[in-house]
Image (cartoon, helix red, strand yellow):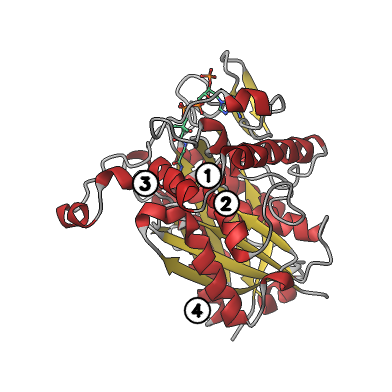
Amino acid sequence: MKECVIVDGLRTANVRAHAEKGWFRSIRPDDMLIQVYKGLFARNPLVKPGDVEAVFCGTANQVGMQNDIARLSWLAGGFPESVASNGVCQQCPSGMSAVEHAARAIMCGEGDIYIASGVEDMQKVPMGYAMDFPPTLLSRYNIADIPMGSTAEKVAEIYKINRTDMETMALWSNKKAFAATSEGKFKDEIIPVQGEKEDGTPFTVDRDQWIREDISMEKMATMASPFKPGGVVTAATSSPLTAGAAALLLMNREKADALGLTYHLKYAGGAMAGNDPTVMGIGPIFAVKKLLQRANLNVRDIGIWELNEAFASQALAVVRDLGIARNAPFDNVNVRGGALALGHALGESGIRIIVTLNSIMKTDFRDAQYGVATLCGGFGNSNATLWQKIHE
Ligand SMILES: CC(C)(COP(=O)(O)OP(=O)(O)OC[C@H]1O[C@@H](n2cnc3c(N)ncnc32)[C@H](O)[C@@H]1OP(=O)(O)O)[C@@H](O)C(=O)NCCC(=O)NCCS
């Protein structure tokens, strides 16, 4: 088998998916994606767009502006028609699934160079838009238990995760994200894109919009749950509605060597796991267990984790069940903040967390031998990927 390495990764800033306040409200999701692709090629001039075997793109809601966005954005960006593109849909893990498709293709020798990407604009294509549930599904599950916020409430109840612990995690996530931004840690991974401020002033967006510097336990304690009367999950402990795009340049290691390109992580496996959709957020527990068992590793072998924070309740349930940690602050999980602060642009997040992991393992966690990126998925469909340090 060939080896698949990360040559580069790039993303737009994650911004509010909001018609009046979102910094990318005048930019289409395909355009966000095109700008990321162009940025990747500009940073890697030895790789020409025509050298790419295929582009995989994860998007959760593939309707309207996001219908076959994989192909249409590639063509709209002026890239070669000869390069195939494939849209991947698996709700939130769509982007991570795109990575796994590309990695497997490289490892089995189908091609040498792939782009794995993801994009979502949750304002222009709202979550669940135009969805038509199969009637038999609705006789299997209670429709009220299916929406993401309801699943987060149910996980909090089953796993006895209290509100203070969730809000402590939201506070920590925002503080870490704010510190990482202030220290320029996202500088290398965010491509600046022209957007507009809340008042309409044009500006270059090179930082994530959601991060709250002024977050406080006192304010969070006053917020009500939008999901359930008397519930414990609030806007502060939920990932916000977000727009963003991200992409990874993945390559057969021999090809990267032949081109003289540098890399420091290789794909060491992926696992998907299904679980009860009414508690979809605990899915990473099953995906990570499968992943580690196959690789003959245990939780302590993993030096650094990127765990998508769809909701604080599910993220805490996952770290507790796996024995990684009990409460924030965490030593080696989401050390630059997570989706509670950075946002969660559904199909983009599976790429975003790997882009960030790649950067963390190159800088702050240089000695970590293994890193895991994992996220839960709507309707009970989660993924985890294992990344191994290569010492050149
Ligand atoms: C939770 C949710 C319903 C809130 O949506 P919303 O009501 O449109 O609004 P906002 O995110 O703008 O937040 C609502 C309010 O809470 C405030 N707020 C949010 N987080 C806060 C925090 N940490 N501290 C203080 N205030 C906060 C906002 O500022 C806003 O108040 P304002 O209107 O006075 O400015 C929405 O973000 C959501 O559905 N999230 C989950 C998305 C999801 O399911 N993703 C998939 C996961 S699998």
Residue positioned 51% across, 71% down in the render: 271
- Distance, label 3 to label 2, CA atoms, is 23 Å
Which mark, residue 110?
Answer: 4
Which of the two residues, 348 or 33, is positioned nearer the viewer here? 348
Identified by mark 1, the residue type is Phe
Which mark, residue 28?
Answer: none
Q: Secondary structure at mark 4?
A: loop
Q: Ligand 1 closer than 8 Å to the CB at disc 1?
A: yes
Which mark, residue 61?
Answer: 3
Residue 48 % position (x, y) = 61, 60
Identified by mark 2, the residue type is Ala
Identified by mark 3, the residue type is Asn
Which of the two residues, 57 or 360, is positioned nearer the viewer here? 360
Q: Secondary structure at mark 3?
A: loop
Residue 285 % position (x, y) = 53, 64
* Residue 115 falls left or right of residue 173: left
Query: Of all residues shown, which one is farthest toward the top?
Result: 199
Q: Secondary structure at mark 2?
A: helix
Which mark, residue 315?
Answer: 2
Label 3 environment density (alpha carbons within 10 Å; few <14, some 14–19, many ≥20): many
Q: Secondary structure at mark 1?
A: loop
- Asked if the residues shown at circle 2 and circle 1 are in contact, with their CB atoms under 8 angstroms apart, the answer is yes
Residue labelled with disc 1: 311
Identified by mark 4, the residue type is Glu
Pick whichever of labels 3 and 4 is earlier in the sequence: 3
**Can residue 144 be spotted in the picture?**
yes
